Image (cartoon, grey):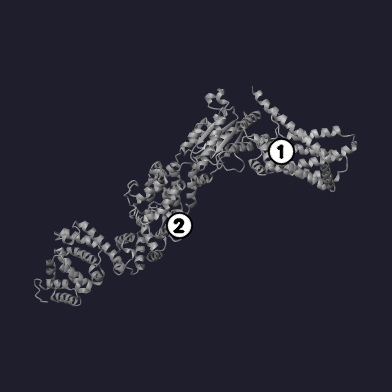
Amino acid sequence: MSQVKTLPITATRWLSLLLCAITAATITVFLSKVGFVQKTYSSLGAILNANPVLHYSSAFLAGIGIKLLLDKFYISHPKRSIGFNWRYPPVTIAVLASLFLTVFYMLSTAPKFDEAALYAQSFMSLKYLALTFIGMLITVIYQTKLYTQKPIFTAVLVALSLIYIVFAVSLADITPAFNVFMYLAASYFILAAYLLFDEYRQSKQPSITTENEDVTIQINPELNSLEDFRKWFKDDSTIKSTEELEPDLQVYATRITERLKNGGDKGDKGDKGEKDLAQHIALCGPYGCGKSSIVESIVNDLAKNSEKESVWIHSDISTWGAASGSVAHVVLSNIIDDISQYIDMCAFRALPKHYTEALKSGGSAFQFASTLLAGPVDIEGSFQKLNNVLKTTNHKLLITLQDVDRGTGDENEKRLNDIAALLDRLKNRDLNHINFIIVMGNEKPEHAVVLGKVVDHIETIISQDFKKILCGWVKLCTKEIFDKHLVLTHSAENDIDEYTKNNPLPLRQGFYQPAIISNNLIDSIRMLKRVMRRISKCWTEEKLLGEVDFGSLLLITTLREDNPALFNAFVNSYVSLVYGKLLTVAKTEDGKQKTINETLSNLIADFTNSEATHVYNALFKELLNLKEDITDKSGNSLKSNKNSGEQHLGVKPGSIDYLKRVLLETVPESELRDQVVIDSIKSSSTQELAKHVCSDYRWQEAFDRFGRKLLLDDKNQDRVKQITFDVLEHIGKDPNGFLTEGVFEEYTKQTIDSGNLESVLIKLVNLESGEKLLEHQLDKLQRTLDFKINMGNKTEGYGNIKGETERMEAANYSNELFQSINISNLLNSNGHKLSKRSFFICLKFKAFAQLADDKLNFLNKLIKNLFKVVINNKNTRVVDYLINATTSGDIQIGHVKEEFVKLSPEEREDILQTLVELRDNQENNSDIDIAIKNLSFSEGCNRSV
């Protein structure tokens, strides 16, 4: 049965080659009789015979030209084996046959000739023929690159060429030299035969990869270091071996390979009905998921089986950009080009379409010629003939159609329909040597429906889970921060082991939100590698290492790769979202500013489909560190303020833009590097740090954000103290200084707690900008004292502290907290520099310290101390504090009068005189009059003012 199928191809091939040979011989004989041809040849011969070098050079160049011409017309091919197949012989047989026919005709019709002359002519002809073969062999060597594999070939060829030229010049007229040239010619033929046989032998060996070609390693290799990861995602080339595929992808490659080798499912191996049909297989999956690697692995698996069964030929065709209506011609043309590397395909080549179109435009005669030359192409018939040739030559063809669904618009739909129509026409033909794999995406269900009706088998690649890879990589990237002796700004740990021990959940694949969200958006290994390559490029010490939150960097990079339109919209809206500036995009129709959640919801709705909304909701909530879920459109709050030590995109310091850092992939020159600031806080000169902080708003802001790093370790107390005093030294008298809030207040508190209250108080009372900070620190001391003695927070709540034990405890607490400072001297010399609250807090501490001396009432002691300060410091501000105490309800007026009477007459007179003088110098003096009246009419004081 098989013989019946192969004989027509063999007989047709031999008959066509015989007709070609007869035609070529006839034309040659005919031209030899034409006068102008004879004249031209004689003239050329005269020129060449003038110098032997011209003859040798022309013969040598002729060999090169013939080889290149044969390659151009696909009569030969650099990669094609020279193995002869009598059932489908190469077209070069027609060339040799035409030569023999011409020689036979010339010998049979020629008159008697001189034997000596015949030998001489034969000698010269063989010389030139040998040189022609040399040119052809050199072309073969360079085309097959054998000189790079085995340089000895080039050396031998050059040596033989030199010997040949020497003998050709010196022995040209010596008859015995004929034998020398015969031996040389035989040597060239032996060399050529060995080279081509070696090439043939190597082509038969299964080759998975070519020389110097990198191969992508498995999706799950041993990734134990950042260097392992870099090697892995740097190489995005196609995997060419099933063993190197990720285990899940190996299943697809193995299943398709078995189907191609068996002609269908294993269960149908004996079923002729399916085995004799072409296999049409659809391989579907998202872009970059490994479809090309599966195809390459299948091709190499089939190549391993070539020696046992048929030799597989792979034709990989991209239909992207192919015009609709010409898809079948494009496929057929590419197939013929690929098969021609293995088999002579001259019989299948038609005149290119653009040639025939040019002929049609040249007039009626050319139109007629184009009609004859470019008749209708029977696609189905051509495939049937190709199948017969492949079967005759023991080859099988695997056609992979790539990018069948790539493109936009109606043209893409038409092209896909053309491919489906072609497969449908070929489906029921006996084409068991021609197989198709259609590679396409699975984003458009309607495309799968179209091809599902015409293919025999569909494989759909499932989405892969990259969380484990991402979390492992994130941990190594986090470790890189510690390895470079940098600081993880939102953590107190100093190494990765300590960090993972104290934070066991964040980097695990089931809890690390950036990896979970990115995994839901990354749909292929190719996209994963693009994201990782982009991040790795900027995650260096010179760029962004330790300068942005890695989770934010991962999320924003994933968004850029997954949805560029939404990414651009988010970038344009970022200022409005985070800083609340009224941009057009952030306003509602009535002119009101949209909430953060409402703006994000609108962006997501505009640039995504409804199925992906929840993923992008989670992404933006994590990216900006939002308090509420985005579905709550009234939400308008970020968890992090401008002084947060975190580095994600939801932090909004005035001098730093973390999104800008991500976009530039480096820290802008106008911004301070976070790690530089942290290093300065931890280890640089405290004087230099203080100068920076006191003169540059960027440093003040950065100090507020990262200064707490020192407070986390008790070992840094001395440095905190030094920084505090250096800042107080350089802060100047700016009333708008940064001392009133932020981390410096904590520095001051720790410095005070370490036994430096008096030094800090002296520094602060002499700073115009230190009043608020001093009040805050004294207020903290008072709250601590109130808590210890359980007396509440208001002055009138103290009352009488009864009992000697209670009084002793109150005195000890006061001395301990106020570090036994001489409060009297402080108030006498600096009382006028204190705020009202600071002034009375100092008085309270002095009063508590005096409770151990006698049983006097606490408020009485407070008022007594106030009078003493007024007597010693008659500053207007201090006197105002007395007036306030005398006229307000904070202190019972009876206590004031009681203590005023206990003063000496001179002291009472001095105080009243001070009040009178102050009254006379002020316009609004009603409170002073009340104070004078209350004091003048105190019991035991009869002075009338």
**Is 380 left, or right, of 852 in this rendering?**
right
Residue 852: quarter of image = bottom left
Residue 863, position as x, y percentages in the image: 16, 67
Helix, strand or loop at mark 2: loop
Residue 895: quarter of image = bottom left
Query: What crowding class fits label 2: few (fewer than 14 Cα within 10 Å), some (14-19), or many (20 or more)?
Result: many
Q: Which residue is mark 1?
A: 195
Residue at 61 percent of width and 38 percent of height: 334
Residue at 42 percent of width and 58 percent of height: 679
Quadrant where the C terminus is found in the figure: bottom left
| Residue 437 visible in the current orientation | yes
**Is 90 left, or right, of 629 in this rendering?**
right
**Residue 126 position (above or below residue 597):** above
Residue 56, position as x, y percentages in the image: 80, 45
Residue 797, position as x, y percentages in the image: 16, 59
Q: Nearer the viewer, residue 481 or 264?
A: 264
Helix, strand or loop at mark 1: helix
Quadrant where the N terminus is found in the figure: top right
| Residue 460 visible in the current orientation | no
Query: What's the amino acid at mark 1?
Result: Leu
Q: Nearer the viewer, residue 794 or 289?
A: 289
Cα separation between marks 1 and 2: 60 Å
Query: What crowding class fits label 1: few (fewer than 14 Cα within 10 Å), some (14-19), or many (20 or more)?
Result: some
**Is 296 left, or right, of 23 in this rendering?**
left
Tell me which numbered mark, 1 or 2, is placed earlier along the sequence.
1
Q: Nearer the viewer, residue 593 or 411?
A: 411
For residue 667, the mark is 2
Q: Nearer the viewer, residue 498 or 912?
A: 912
**Residue 705 position (above or below residue 477):** below
**Residue 637 position (above or below residue 188):** below
Query: What's the amino acid at mark 2?
Result: Val
For residue 524, the mark is none
